[in-house]
Image (cartoon, rainbow, N blue to C red):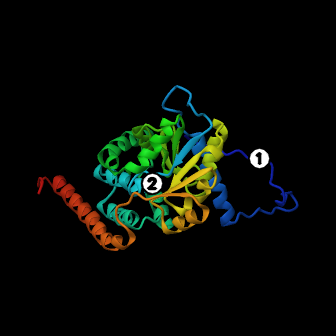
Amino acid sequence: MSAENGSGPPAQGRPSLTSGTPRRARTTPRRDLKVRSKLAGEASSAAREVESSLEAPADPTAAAFFDVDNTIIQGASIFHLARGLHRRQFFTTRDILGAAWKQAYFRVVGVEDPEHVAEARSSALAFIKGHRVEELVAIGEEIFDETMAERIWPGTRALAQMHLDQGQRVWLVTAAPVEIATTIAGRLGLTGALGTVAEHVDGVYTGALVGDLLHGPAKAEAVLGLAEAEGLDLDRCAAYSDSYNDVPMLSLVGDPCVINPDAKLRDHAREQGWRIRDYRTGRKAARVGLFGAAVTGAVTGTVAAGLALRRRQSGLGPF
């Protein structure tokens, strides 16, 4: 969905522009980030999916919002997507080796690195530019069935089902592309998804985002927009996430819960008296050793896939 930005009246305190004083209003990086986050939240809220059921929910003013990466699914969904696209020759083995390292780091350490997130965004936009929306949707469904389905945290899935059983709606809220988020929501039988909106014109991706990633404050903006549109009482809603970056979203609702939290979010949750659920089998002491194994496994598997691809292309056949 392409977006058009309207221009409203100038904000209070902003210098007026007249013919005698041709000055340009300055936008600080912090303010620019806030504007892009707000736009991303509004775009995601506007692009939300309608409920899978035509029946009205039994409890229409309560809902639950779930982060995806390391909350619903083990690891980062964008890297599962990248691996699937690599198998379909969207990009090179060298590209996926970098993704494998970041995926292993994220799975073991459980902390979102802003630099990794930004690189993932740039890479994702580069490889979908010029492709059609329906193509990515179809491939995303295949990739979910191939690699993501088996990585769903059963405990988190049970929490989502609990809300559904209580007649409440359940949305995913994620920095992942809204098309992939919608596929995950559909496969899990959830209401819908809010995700990062990539601009497309006439069904073809332009390589730009509408606003920015649905990340941090942008998630809160999206939830606020959805709550207003759907008549939700946020005091009766719940939210779930693993990352301290999602404190703005968690703080909006009456029942925040942290899932597989990073250290900073765990401390914050304890201070606030929020519920804590940890479905990871390894503890921090064990994860130091597991990190090396995870990296080795990810890289070894990726190299093997790359070599197999090259052998097929050269007509040598399988190993």
Badge number at residue 71: 2
* Residue mark closest to the camera, 1 vs 2: 2
Task: Give the residue displayed 80% in from the left and 48% down from the top.
Answer: 9
x and y percentages locating residue 296 in the rendered image: 26, 68
Kindly indicate the quadrant of the structure image that contains residue 311: bottom left
Q: Is residue 188 above or below residue 93?
A: above
| Mark 1: amino acid | Gly
The residue carrying pointer 2 sits among few (fewer than 14), some (14 to 19) or many (20 or more) residues within 10 Å by Cα, namely: many
Residue 197 seen in this snapshot? no
For residue 302, above or below residue 200? below
The secondary element bearing badge 2 is classed as loop
Provide the secondary structure element on which disc 1 rests.
Answer: loop
Q: Do we see residue 28 in this rendering?
A: yes
Residue in front for this viewpoint, 201 or 193: 193
- Say which quadrant the C terminus sits in: bottom left
Residue 103's spot in the image, x, y percent?
Answer: 37, 62
Q: Is residue 26 above or below residue 84?
A: below
